Image (cartoon, grey):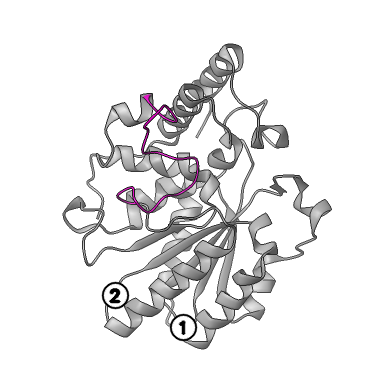
Amino acid sequence: MIPQSKAFDAKSLRKTVLDMAYAGSTVHIGCAFSIIDLLAVLYRNHLRYPGNDPIAAGRDYFVLSKGHGVMAQYACIRELGWLKDEAFTGYFANGSDLKGLSDSRIPGLEVTSGSLGHGFSVGVGMAMGAKLRGTDQKTYALVGDGEINEGPIWEGALFAAHHDLKDFMVIVDENGFQAMGSTQDVLKLGSIQAKFESFGFEAITIDGHDEVAIDGAITQLWASNSTAPKALIAKTVKGKGVDFMENNNIWHYTRLDPVTYAQALSAVAGSVQ
């Protein structure tokens, strides 16, 4: 379990993301902000890393299939002490190890992802491996709602249900947007919970920024006696925590300048969690 001294405060995590994005003049801020509360709860309360070791043999697996949200995960693993401060101040600088997509060469990042739909299937395979080994390891795969347009998501879902991968959980970041527009305009999704249930998953929908609700739903799903894989549908706000970024899809690809950086820091500092 994560050391209790690590608070994973969402405000602090968002500030780290802003600092990284500004230092590296990089994008995908809104995509990271929608998942920060989910990751804070996972790392604080659920993910198990024996000895605080990111490559411990008995660890749980967290796969960020939505690889472009990786700054949120970097912020969390900084709290664990797996990355040094200079990795953040030098983000995207010449020679930086930290990329704009999840990269398995970084301790704590299980999968190189960013080709959407791919990480989910890899996570299903990891869960299958844990089942074959007879371990109690949990596997979480976090996907975006736009990402579930991809066929491999549903192929992997069929496989997970067929093999009763009860220790596999997909978390869907349902923020209503993808790179080029709203999910409603690009490809209507309907009820994501109903879709996963129809594929044999046990599913719950919650407010993805309510940490009590997130924690309770994860606990409830793992407490189930069902052998079905799990799905947590998290309704979120893209750009959550900074008013001018919230539900504003230009922040999928917009970079911070000195003015917007200062404004965003002020907004995060004054936000209510």
Whether the magenta-drawn stretch holds residue 100 is answered as yes
Q: Quick one: SS at disc 2? A: loop
Q: Where is residue 124 shown, x and y percent of the image? A: 46, 73
Q: Quadrant of the N terminus?
A: bottom left
What's the residue at 45%, 49% (across, down)?
Answer: 102
The residue that disc 2 covers is: 136
- Give the label on residue 226, or none: 1
Magenta segment, which residues? 90-108
Disc on res. 48? none
Amino acid type of the residue tagged 2 in the rendering: Asp
- Please name the predominant secondary structure of the magenta segment in the image: loop
Image coordinates of residue 130 in percent, x first then y, are 33, 77
Residue ID at (34%, 51%): 105
Measuring from the top left, give residue 111's x and y in whole percent.
42, 58
Residue at x-position 42% and y-position 82% = 225
Q: Earlier in the sequence, mark 1 or mark 2?
A: 2
Q: Amino acid at mark 1?
A: Ser
Residue 95 position by quadrant: top left
Question: Left or right: 126 with respect to 53?
Answer: right
Residue 223 seen anywhere in this rendered image of the structure = no
Rendered view: 112 above or below 224:
above
